[in-house]
Image: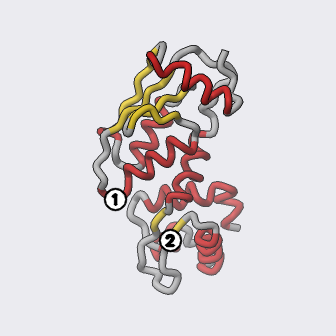
Amino acid sequence: MLYDVLGTGALVTIVGLISQGRTADKLFKCFAKYSAWRIKQMLHEQKLHGYIEYDEEDEHSRIYITNKGFVRFAKKKLKNITALRWDHFWRLICFDIPEKNGSRRKFQYLLKSIGGFKLQKSLYAYPHDCKNEILNMASDLRISSCVDVYIVPNLGRREQEVRKFYLYRQLELN
């Protein structure tokens, strides 16, 4: 079954193929050993959940991932970044992303969804090591040249505010 191959990572597989410019008919070719009905069923389910958008009547239409789908995909990739104990260093995620294709909003939505603290318009703080995962997500969005992650020992005058934010979210910072 297609779901056995894709498991709960159906969206991850779709996103990987979409990032290569796939359309529904090309997706059918990638999974040629599965019935077109099963593939359509899986795509329809992802569309019902609001993770992707495409025209189900036109097999040649492009498949687009929605913000909701992107966040679900990102959370799957970023699920292991929260360490058990804080190492007393902050990760500053800085970006200067042009507004083309909605990449800036998707990236900001991703940072908010993983619990990033917005310090400024294009500057977020996070208490756990997330550099590789964030840079990988930036690469998936084709914005890696616009994103940097810095490790700093303190956040200056905003340190207490950010600590309270994470303590309120019940993350262990000690």
Q: Which mark is residue 134?
A: none
Spot occupied by residue 89 in the image (x, y as percentages of width and height): 52, 16
Amino acid carrying mark 1 in the image: Asn
- Give the mark count: 2
Residue 62 lies, in percent from the top left, at 42, 72
The answer to which of 93 and 77 lies nearer the viewer is 93
- In this rendering, position of residue 50 left or right of residue 172: left
Classify 117 as above or below 39: above
The CA distance from mark 2 to mark 1 is 15 Å
> Does label 2 or label 1 sit earlier along the sequence?
2
Residue at 35% in and 48% down: 142
Residues packed near mark 2 inside 10 Å, few (<14), some (14 to 19) or many (20 plus): some
Q: Position of residue 148 (x, y in %)?
A: 36, 31
Q: In this view, which residue lies farthest toward the bottom?
A: 57
Evaluate whether residue 33 shows in this view: no
- Give the structural element (helix, strand or loop) at label 2: strand
The disc label shown at residue 101, or none: 1
Q: Is residue 88 above or below residue 52?
A: above
- Quadrant holding the N terminus: bottom right
Compared across the picture, whether 47 is left or right of 54 comes to right
What residue is shown at x 53% (from left), y 43% (from top)?
Answer: 112
Numbered tag placed on residue 53 in the rendering: 2
**Circle 1 SS class:** helix
Q: Is residue 140 above or below residue 152?
A: below
User: What is the crowding at mark 1: few (fewer than 14 residues within 10 Å), some, or many (at least 20)?
Assistant: few
Q: Quadrant for residue 173, please give it.
A: top right
Q: In this view of the protein, can residue 3 be seen by the observer?
A: yes
Q: Please state the horizontal and vertical placement of residue 88, each as a whole percent of the image.
A: 57, 14
Tag 2: amino acid: Glu
Give the quadrant of the C terminus: top right
Name the residue at 46% across, 43% down: 137
Q: Residue at x 62, y 60 (%)?
A: 10
